[in-house]
């Protein structure tokens, strides 16, 4: 099903209709849809024509090196910045920062609290700013504090909390008003494994209940574990968009690990190249024009006893480094105006 | 609006519940009333006692150097500059033989140098004694002189301002006092509460809560909530001060001896005239009555209305600018100093102009300074104290108020735009030039 562009779209100048026809319009159940977002600062293009959809109930990874434009993108999604051009659709309708702000929970990377304020009052205040009534907010805070074993914290001040504790508090404040869209920027930094797991389980539970989660990080192993779908941005442009499994397939390099019986050995030949070997485990790359079957045939012909044979997919970390390396991405960080 | 209200509430309650606020609010009036009472007490009892030996070859000075509770004069025979300290005197006053037509000075030597006020009172007594002697030499009788002195002290300058048919007693000294005090109060308010707004914004920025809040409310709502909340704290503090000072003063007056209180109230009933058959009112009762009477000549409703208007208007005007500066400062509070300079300079200038205006409310500089919103809160208050419409015409007051309203709408708009960019920007040193670029760039 193709949804037709709304009227303001057609009025917009600089629109290439071809681009729209190619673009997949909300064919899935997209909670959030970014369309040709641009945000230019005086010295650089922070976000340069980025489009993607985020499916309802999914855990979405927004990745990119420092200064790639992630924060600018997130600030546009949270209504803090207006895009120079392009559109944000939330649940199919144009995003209205005034009304839709309450549907979003945002946990920025740089987390802040009023140091002198009591924790309970602070949570209440921030929940009320999100449009909850006082009674409703109190009830929810008590529920979450109990869940995270924070009940005794109510009258403590933030300055008395450890970094991990205040991070838990921050997470509670972010999800308290049951937002449809939860944006977490580096939610695990500074957490011990126990608390990190606690938060991770909550993230899964929230997604299961129908919340959509945008997860921004540069910790690739977490992305691989948690996210369904990722977008990689670099230098203000989207350079990768797809499911984690799909992207790994896309970037696979025909690498396999083979394990053979101790005492025998294989070496590079016309069918495959040995990349590395350790004891009787080999990492090989199948040469162009050959398949797994050719390799197996070769091993059998050599009368080598095969113990294990696995495809090696690149880690997201490797893909990330491969795509970003050499683009001087880091130099862009801290140059924003 | 609902969210702005939440922010105002937080800003207000978190400050009003603060111990420092409570201490400052309740100690300041105690301190002011205490200081006034103490200085009144010391002016009566005197702080030092001086015993002065007078060497007077003329003889006629003796009668006019009367002992007071601070000074005693004696006229010993065998005392000179070498031995007056051994003989128990604190000072020695040596008068020459006065002769008509020749100028001759008299000398005071002291163990400890004498205060200026005391010196002046001694020299005025001696000079008037010489004047009296000369008048007597010219043939005027002593008893006639005494009656002239007594009669001449009855009169004093009473200035009236003409308002069409009726005229009203005016008092330049009081106008100066009110103008100066309200100007100073507004000046202090700008600094104290403006800086409080700036620090509040800086706090939110440096501890990074700004981004959390701005994902819930608009930056402008956050800024306005803070400005209004802190302004309400300032108003609360002033109202408490006024209430406390008035009640403490009446408590302090209650400690006056009952006969003085009685005299003051009968003076009030008789409108300052000594009623026939009434006991002569004592000097202190007369002074208290005069003070109360002088205070009552001012147009208080107008002054209080103008004070509140210029307090709020001036506060909003400057607080917005302070908020803009606060939003651009990074971790280092030192950065704020240089950025604050363009805000504090007009404040200090206005204060200097106010000092001039309290003495002369109708110069061209007074007029212009009371129109420009940078200085009008202070300068116009100093002028309004001299009376509306006698010193300031109604159209001037109205125009000044309109300019101030337009002024704070403009600074709020300007600061809102600077704030929106500044509050989320870290790691960049900001100058006023950059701030203006932010203010006028497209959204």
Image (spheres, coloured by chain):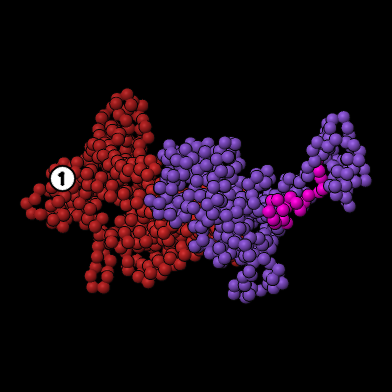
Work out which residue is located at the far left of the displayed protein and give it: B277
Where is residue A190? Give x, y as percent. Answer: 59, 39
Residue A108 lies within the magenta run:
no
- Judged left or right of residue A74, residue A320 is right
Task: Give the camera-side residue of B301 and B143.
Answer: B301
SS type, badge 1: helix
Q: Is residue B361 visible?
A: yes
Assess disc 1: are there few (<14), some (14-19) or many (≥20) residues with their C-alpha within 10 Å of its C-alpha: some
Task: Look at chain A in the picture and name its colour.
Answer: purple
Task: Give the camera-side residue of A207 and B242.
Answer: A207
Q: Quadrant of the N terminus of chain A?
A: bottom right
Q: Which chain contains the residue that carries disc 1? A: B
Where is residue B178? Give x, y as percent. Answer: 33, 56
Asked if B399 appears above or below B134 in the picture, the reply is: below
Where is residue B431? Give x, y as percent. Answer: 61, 55
- Judged left or right of residue A251, residue B146 is left
Where is residue B67? Give x, y as percent. Answer: 23, 37
Q: Is residue B59 visible?
A: no
Asked if A165 appears above or below A40 in the picture, the reply is: above
Residue A243 lies within the magenta run:
yes
Chain letter of the red region: B
Which residue was labeled with disc 1? B260
Task: Give the camera-side residue of A293 and B189.
Answer: A293
- Magenta stretch: give its range: A239-257
Look at 89% across and 34% down and name the residue there: A265
Q: Quadrant of residue B362?
A: bottom left
Q: Quadrant of residue A164?
A: top right
């Amino acid at each position: 099903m193709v949804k037709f562009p709304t009227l303001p779209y057609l009025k917009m100048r600089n629109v290439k209709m071809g681009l729209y026809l190619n673009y997949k319009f909300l064919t899935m159940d997209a909670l959030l849809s970014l369309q040709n977002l641009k945000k230019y600062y005086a010295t650089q293009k922070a976000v340069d024509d980025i489009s993607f959809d985020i499916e309802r109930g999914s855990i979405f990874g927004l990745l990119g090196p420092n200064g790639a434009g992630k924060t600018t993108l997130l600030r546009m999604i949270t209504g803090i910045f207006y895009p120079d051009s392009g559109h944000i659709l939330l649940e199919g309708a144009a995003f209205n920062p005034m009304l839709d702000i309450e549907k979003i929970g945002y946990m920025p990377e740089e987390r802040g609290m009023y140091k002198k304020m009591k924790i309970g009052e602070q949570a209440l205040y921030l929940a009320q700013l999100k449009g909850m009534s006082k009674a409703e907010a109190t009830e929810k805070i008590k529920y979450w504090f109990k869940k995270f074993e924070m009940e005794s914290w109510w009258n403590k001040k933030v300055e008395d909390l450890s970094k991990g504790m205040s991070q838990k508090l921050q997470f509670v404040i972010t999800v308290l008003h049951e937002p449809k869209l939860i944006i977490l920027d580096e939610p695990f930094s500074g957490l011990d494994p126990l608390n990190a797991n606690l938060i991770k389980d909550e993230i899964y539970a929230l997604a299961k209940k129908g919340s959509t989660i945008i997860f921004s990080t540069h910790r690739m192993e977490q992305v691989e574990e948690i996210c369904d779908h990722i977008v990689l941005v670099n230098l203000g442009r989207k350079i990768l968009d797809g499911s984690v499994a799909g992207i790994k397939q896309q970037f696979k390099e025909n690498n396999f690990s083979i394990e053979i019986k101790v005492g025998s050995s294989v070496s590079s030949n016309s069918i495959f190249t040995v990349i590395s070997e350790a004891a009787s485990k080999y990492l090989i790359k199948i040469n162009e024009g050959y398949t797994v079957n050719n390799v197996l045939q070769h091993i059998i012909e050599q009368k080598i006893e095969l113990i294990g044979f696995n495809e090696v997919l690149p880690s997201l970390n490797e893909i990330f480094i491969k795509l970003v390396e050499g683009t001087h991405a880091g130099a862009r960080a801290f140059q924003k105006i | 609006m609902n969210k702005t209200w939440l922010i105002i509430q937080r800003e207000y309650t978190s400050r009003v519940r603060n111990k420092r606020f409570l201490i400052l609010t309740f100690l300041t009036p105690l301190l002011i009333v205490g200081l006034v009472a103490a200085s009144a007490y010391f002016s009566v009892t005197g702080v030092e006692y001086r015993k002065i030996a007078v060497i007077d070859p003329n003889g006629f000075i003796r009668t006019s150097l009367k002992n007071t509770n601070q000074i005693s004069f004696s006229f010993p025979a065998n005392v000179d500059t070498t031995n007056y300290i051994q003989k128990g005197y604190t000072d020695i006053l040596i008068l020459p033989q006065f002769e008509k037509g020749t100028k001759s000075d008299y000398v005071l030597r002291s163990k400890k140098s004498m205060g200026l006020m005391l010196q002046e009172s001694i020299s005025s007594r001696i000079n008037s004694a010489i004047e009296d002697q000369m008048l007597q030499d010219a043939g005027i009788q002593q008893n006639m002189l005494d009656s002239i002195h007594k009669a001449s002290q009855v009169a004093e300058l009473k200035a009236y301002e003409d308002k069409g048919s009726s005229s009203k007693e005016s008092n330049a000294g009081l106008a100066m006092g009110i103008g100066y005090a309200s100007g100073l109060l507004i000046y202090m308010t700008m600094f104290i509460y403006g800086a409080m707004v700036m620090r509040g914004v800086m706090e939110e920025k440096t501890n990074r809560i700004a981004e959390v809040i701005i994902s819930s409310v608009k930056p402008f709502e956050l800024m306005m909530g803070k400005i209004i909340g802190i302004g309400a704290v300032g108003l609360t503090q002033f109202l408490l001060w006024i209430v406390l000072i008035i009640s403490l003063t009446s408590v302090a007056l209650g400690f006056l001896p009952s006969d003085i209180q009685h005299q003051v109230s009968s003076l009030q009933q008789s409108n300052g005239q000594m009623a026939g058959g009434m006991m002569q009112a004592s000097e202190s009762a007369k002074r208290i009555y005069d003070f109360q009477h002088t205070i009552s000549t001012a147009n208080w409703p107008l002054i209080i209305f103008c004070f509140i208007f210029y307090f709020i208007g001036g506060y909003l005007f400057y607080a917005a600018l302070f908020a803009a500066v606060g939003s651009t400062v990074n971790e280092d509070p030192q950065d704020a100093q240089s950025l604050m300079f363009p805000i504090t300079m007009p404040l200090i200038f206005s204060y200097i102009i106010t000092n001039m205006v309290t003495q002369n409310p109708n110069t061209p500089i007074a007029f212009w300074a009371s129109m420009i919103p940078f200085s009008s809160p202070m300068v116009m208050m100093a002028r309004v104290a001299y009376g509306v419409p006698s010193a300031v015409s109604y159209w001037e007051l109205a125009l000044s108020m309109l300019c101030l309203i337009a002024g704070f709408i403009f600074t709020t708009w300007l600061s809102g735009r600077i704030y929106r960019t500044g509050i989320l920007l870290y790691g960049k040193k900001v100058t006023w030039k950059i701030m203006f670029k932010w203010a006028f760039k497209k959204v």
